[in-house]
Image (tube, rainbow, N blue to C red):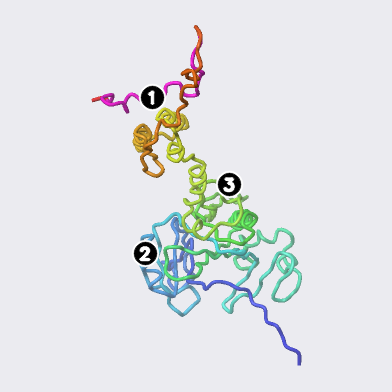
Amino acid sequence: MGSRILTMKKQAAELGRIRTGYSRPNPKNPKGRPIPVRSATFLLSSHSQQYIERAAELYGGEVEKWTPQGQKIAQYRVITEARELRAILPAGDPLSQSYEMWSGGGCTRRCDGVTEQLSRRPCLCLAEHGEDWHEQHEVEQGSVCKPTSRIGVMLADMPDLGVWRLETHSFYAADVMAGGIDTVLQATEGKSLMPVRMWIEQRQVMRPSGPKHFPVVMLVPSIPALRHALSGPLSTAAALDPSTLNRPALEASSAARPDYLAEARGCDTAAAVIEVWHRARAAGHGSDELLADLKQIAEDVKAGVDPRTGVVDDDQGDDEPGPDADGVYDVEVLGEGDSEPPTAYPAATWPEAAQPGGGSR
């Protein structure tokens, strides 16, 4: 008998759920179907009491024990005060979408709009109700599949490594979430994490029977500028702290800054050191600290001290040319109207405030 290779999808552990609503007992019929309630803030639930207590610390709200409808195992939940959540999308494709129908026994249909996956038959809702089958849901609850979107995100300040699953059954939320995820995947190629921001937005659509109100979960990359989301995969550090995305530009500008102190130490005269200061100030790099350092280098040059080594030049001036055999020095004579050649910084002097006694009181 040949061996069989089992291929399974790799995914992180699910730590809990992110919800946008809850249900409460019907006061007119306590034993009947609970009344669904839309929440203006996010709700987190989990089997772990520790997780929900931490969520309450981060996002506000009261921890309560809770049993989901149709289940017997109790969980914990908190209706938070958070209208917005900061999260991280894991690498890969974190979004799952399908049309589903559920009953007390579990999922009875799961379809992509063309083929029902469990029976491998053509879409049953389309065959039963025609092209407008999705409107049948408003006529008779549970008669057709619901659009079901599930996305797993990581909450960086919550304990342990895993994802929190957000699930929605809204057509409009499905479009919004799919569009946002497609943009992220196109930019990162699914190879890196992406910081995102989620919030609940109330929408309205007109129907023949009147306006219909519904919540939509908005999900967008949470980055300082759009170019960061479209520039390729991000580092883990950038996903955890998106503000670091602006730092490389600062470091690059810092790396391009000339080393004025090194230039000044290579000068032969104090006037040349002063010219270094003028260039630094003209480039917007002047500072009190740089001015003080350059002044000290100029003083060393005047005193015959090599600012690079600190060695005093005892032979300073010995290299000056002497007179020739007739006692004549080789000099250039300037005629009337002649002047010194122009320099880039003709005033080889320190700023007034840097002169002894030149500071203002």
Any part of residue 37 in sight? yes
The image position of residue 114, as x and y in percent, is 74, 65
Range of residues picked out in magenta: 338-359
Is residue 351 covered in magenta? yes
The image position of residue 328, as x and y in percent, is 48, 17
Q: Residue 96 falls in which quadrant of the image?
A: bottom right
Mark number, residue 324:
none
Amino acid carrying mark 2 in the image: Ala
Any part of residue 28 in sight? no
Q: Are marks 3 and 2 in contact (CB under 8 Å)?
A: no
If you read the primary sequence from the N terminus, does the residue marked by circle 1 or circle 3 appear first?
A: 3
Label 3, residues with CA under 10 Å away: few <14, some 14-19, many ≥20: few
**303 lies above or below 339:** below
Name the residue beneath numbered marker 3.
Answer: 227
Distance, label 1 to label 2, CA atoms, is: 65 Å
The image position of residue 165, as x and y in percent, is 52, 67
Which SS class for mark 3? helix
Name the residue beneath numbered marker 1.
Answer: 349
Asked if residue 295 lies left or right of residue 213, the reply is left
**219 lies above or below 126:** above
